[in-house]
Amino acid sequence: MNYLELGIGELEAEKSNLEKLYAKYKAMGLKLDMSRGKPASSQLDLSNGSLETLRTTRSVSGTDARNYGILDGLPEMRAYFGELLGLDPETIVVGGNSSLNLMFDMMAQLMLFGPAGYEPWGRQGRLKWLCPAPGYDRHFAITEKFGFEMIIVPMTPTGPDMNIVESLAKDDPEIKGIWCVPLYSNPQGICYSDETVRRLGAMKTAAPDFRIFWDNAYGVHHIVGEKHLADIFAACKAGGNANRPYYFFSTSKITFPGAGVSIMAMTPEERTWALKRMTIQTIGHDKLNQLRLLQFLPTPADLRNHMKKLAGEIAPKFDLVRKKLSEAFEGTGLLSWQVPEGGYFYAVDTLDGCAKRTVALAADAGVKMTGAGATFPLKHDPRDRNIRIAPTYPPVAELDQAMDLFVICAKLAGVEKLLAEKKN
C-alpha cells in the first residue's frame, strides 16, 4: 500500500501495529552490527594462505625485500597494479596498507608544499572542496581537518552532478578539488559514466592547481558482471589538465584490511614532486608485504579470480538486502534506493526528516548502523534522509534479523512523520 495516500485513522492503526512489532524486537536484547563496511571472517579466511606464501625474501628483480630502499615500491609490484588497473607503472608509487593514509598524507603535502609548481595551499587563504554526497565519511573528515569549506554536490545515477561541478569550479579560485569514488561509490554504488569522467578531465577551473582525488577503492569489487570505468588520466590529458588527478587504490578489502598494499598514481611530474617529499619521510614501505601479495596472487588474473570468490561470499548478503527492501517498501512511498552491482554498501533514502529517527530506533533495539548524516560533510544531511547499510560483516542469519528490524524502524519513522504532517 502507498502510505502517502493513507488517512489519519489508517496511519494510526499502522503505527500501533508497528509499535507492537518494534517492542517485540526490543525485548529480544539484540546486539547486531551493520555500522561499518568490514569484511566478514569468512571473507578474510579466503586470504589466510597469504600468511604462508613468503617462500623467498628476494623479488624477481633480485631485491632483498628485508632491507631498506625502493621508495616507490618493487618494480614488479608497480607492473602488477599497472596491468590490473590499466595504469602506466611509471606513474605508480606503492605505499603501506592504507590508501586513506596516502590520501591524508597527500592533502598534508599539498597544504605544506603545494602541487608541483604552485604555492602551498596552506598559504593561499580560504580553501574550498567539492564533496559529492552522499559520500565517504572519511574523505569529508580529511578536508574538515585541514580547514576546507566543503560544498555539497548532489549525486546522480552517472556520478556527481556535472552541471553543478562545472559551474562552481569555473568561477571560484578557492575551490581546490573534488573527492571521487568513481566505481561503486560509497554508499550508493553509483558508477561514473564515460561522459562524467570526460567532463571532469576537461572542465575549466578558476584554480589552476585544482586536483581530483580519485579513490578507486572498489575498482575490482564486482558482484554482478564487471563495470567499465573510463581512464581519468586520459580524460585529463585530453582536456589539457594532465596533472589534475591523484589516483588511489588498495587491497585492503581484497586480502586483509590491516595488511593490504596501497598505491597512488599521478603524472611523472607530480610523482617526482611526491617522491622528493617521501624521501625525507620514509626509507621505504613494507616490501615483504608486497612480496607476500605477489606470491599469494601471482598475476592480476589470480587476483580477479580471488575477487570472484569474495563476490560469492558477499552476493547472498546483497541479495538479502535487496529482497527485504523490495518486499517491504516497493509502492509504499516511504523509501527509495538503488541496487548496487558491486562495492560494499547499500544506501537508502527515507522520507525527509526520518533518517536520524530510523537509526535511533534501530540502535535502541540493538542494531548498530552508520550514523545518520555520516554520508555528508560535517555529518549533516540537509534533508535527514540518507542511511548507509553495511551488509558484509554480519552472518546471513544476523543480517536477516537486522534487516527485519530496520524495516520496522523505517516504516515507524515514516508513519510518525506522515501523521504529524496530516494532524498539522
Image (cartoon, rainbow, N blue to C red):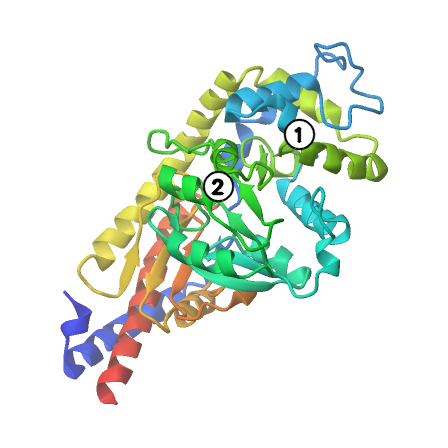
Q: Nearer the viewer, residue 177 or 60?
A: 177
Q: Position of residue 210 (x, y in %)?
A: 59, 50
SS at mark 2 in the image: helix
- 10 Å crowding of disc 1: few (<14), some (14-19), many (20+): some
Q: Is residue 200 left or right of residue 278?
A: left
- Asked if one can make out residue 134 in the rendered structure from this viewpoint, the answer is no
Q: Is residue 326 left or right of residue 354?
A: left
Residue at 72% x, 13% y: name it: 59
Q: Position of residue 35 (x, y in %)?
A: 50, 55
- Asked if one can make out residue 361 in the rendered structure from this viewpoint, the answer is yes
Q: Is 275 above or below relative to 338?
A: above
- The residue labelled by disc 2 is 201
Q: Which mark is residue 268?
A: 1
Residue at 74% x, 24% y: name it: 287
Q: Position of residue 151 (x, y in %)?
A: 51, 63
Closer to the chain start, of discs 1 and 2, is 2
